[in-house]
Image (tube, rainbow, N blue to C red):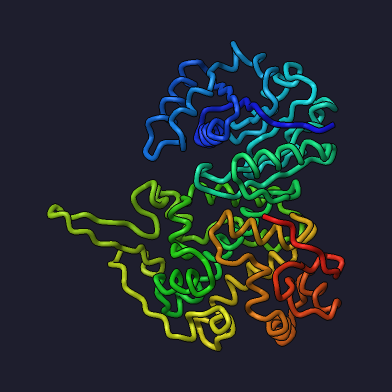
Amino acid sequence: MTRDVKSVAVLGGGTMGLGIAAASADAGADVLLLDVTLEAAEASLDRMINIRPPAFENPESAKRIKLGSFNDDLERIADYDWICEAIIEDLATKRELFAKLEPLRRDGSVVSTNTSGIPLKDIAADMPERLQKDIVVTHFFNPVKIMRLMELIPGEKTTPDVTEALARFCGEKLGKGVVYAKDTVNFIGNRIGCFFMLSGLHKAKAALEAGMPMEKVDALLSKPVGLPPTGLYGLIDLIGLDIMDLVGKNLKVNLPQGDVGLAYTSFPPVEQAMLERGQLGRKAKGGFYRLNIAEDGAKTKEIFDLTSESWRPQETVELSPIHQAPETVFFADDAEGQLVWDIMGGTLLYAADLIPEIADDVVNIDRAMRWGFGWAKGPFELLDQLGTDKVIAKLDAEGKELPVMLKVLKDAGATSFYSEDGSKYMSRDGKWETVPSE
């Protein structure tokens, strides 16, 4: 069966549902937006039109969206090709909705759940065979209008034509960068990105206690390693300590036994105290950083010093040349080099050990981190830039075991994950394969 998505029913008028509905309408699809009540759906459409910037690229797209409620209009999903569930991140609530909608949808329709961390196998467990064949996870990143990444995750029984139909629509019509992930906790982007953040909070403690200012930690973990200027603490401020706490709890329950990430699923004591008093980040007007505005309008930025546990003015940090480029900072024989190797290097090695657990190849992982987290290079692209032979030699000198994909590379007698012209990549079988087009 060849399936084609021309119409979309979005269930849930929250931030993600609004973004998916607006993007689909802008792409020319007929859209049905259902919420708890018709009034809630009307309020959602009003927000889509009036927020700044608007959710729509074309204001006329709003006319393609019809509204309704779960109680009165759920049967209308029979008229739509793709039913996209985007309600709250609660397993029981999602399962209850799928049990209601499954008898109402037509044969040939495709179904997805938009979740950032709940495994599809748990959502679809014991559901009718038809649903298990027709359902995937479509994990859009927020805000949908801006973020390119969309992770597509089939279940064990999902038929290939379902995945193909959604990849085609989301890639060609919505303009998303589609990556293919496995049905594992936090999929690709958040599995690696949250490891960077949670492990970073723990691994930076030694450097801070030795006198390295937090500003330098963020400076090192930004442009010098190809990450956005938020660095470590600034990124967590953007996301929120409360969200990171929920992520950690989810990882603690769902990470496989023996995963190194299990050591970092809770906060260090100072960060835990910040969480408990509501010092969450930008949403709370203060986390690791805060902006103070005086009566005369003068602005000063402060940082919450984790060592003294008090606020102080943010300082300007200048990095030496050796600390400004990946090829040198990762191997620098000083505190700065050790910090980068421990935190960013540890994240690269973690990613190199997750094939085929979270994805089948290096390309999907690299694209997920570039498109979803703003990395200049994905983990394997960055390892190539550093020189995989140098990384392997450093690990050997430290007496550490090589991650899976570095073993594959070494056994294959290769020194990079990508060919020089970028057209080929090293597969998990140690063979060169063609890089799929973006």
Give the image location of residue 147, x and y in percent.
Answer: 53, 48
Q: Is residue 395 left or right of residue 132?
A: left
Q: Position of residue 352 (x, y in %)?
A: 72, 67
Name the one closer to the observer, 11 or 210.
11
Toward the left, the furthest residue is 296
Q: Position of residue 292 (x, y in %)?
A: 25, 56
Quarter-wise, where is residue 7 in the image? top right
Of 247 and 297, the residue lying toward us: 297
Q: For residue 358, what is the image quadrant?
A: bottom right
Tell me: 96 left or right of 126.
left
Percent across and percent down for residue 288 are 39, 60
Q: In the depicted view, which residue is nearer to us: 58 or 410?
A: 58
Residue at 80% of width from left, 58% of height from top?
A: 356
Q: In the drawing, does residue 89 fall left or right of residue 260?
A: left
Figure check: 173 above or below 259: above
Q: Residue at x 55, y 57 (%)?
A: 373
Residue at x 76%, y 71% (from the top left corner):
403
Quadrant of the snapshot with the C terminus:
bottom right
Residue drawn at x 56%, y 21% as measured from the top left: 34
Q: Residue 397 lies in what quarter of the image? A: bottom right
Compared to 394, does 435 lie above or below?
above
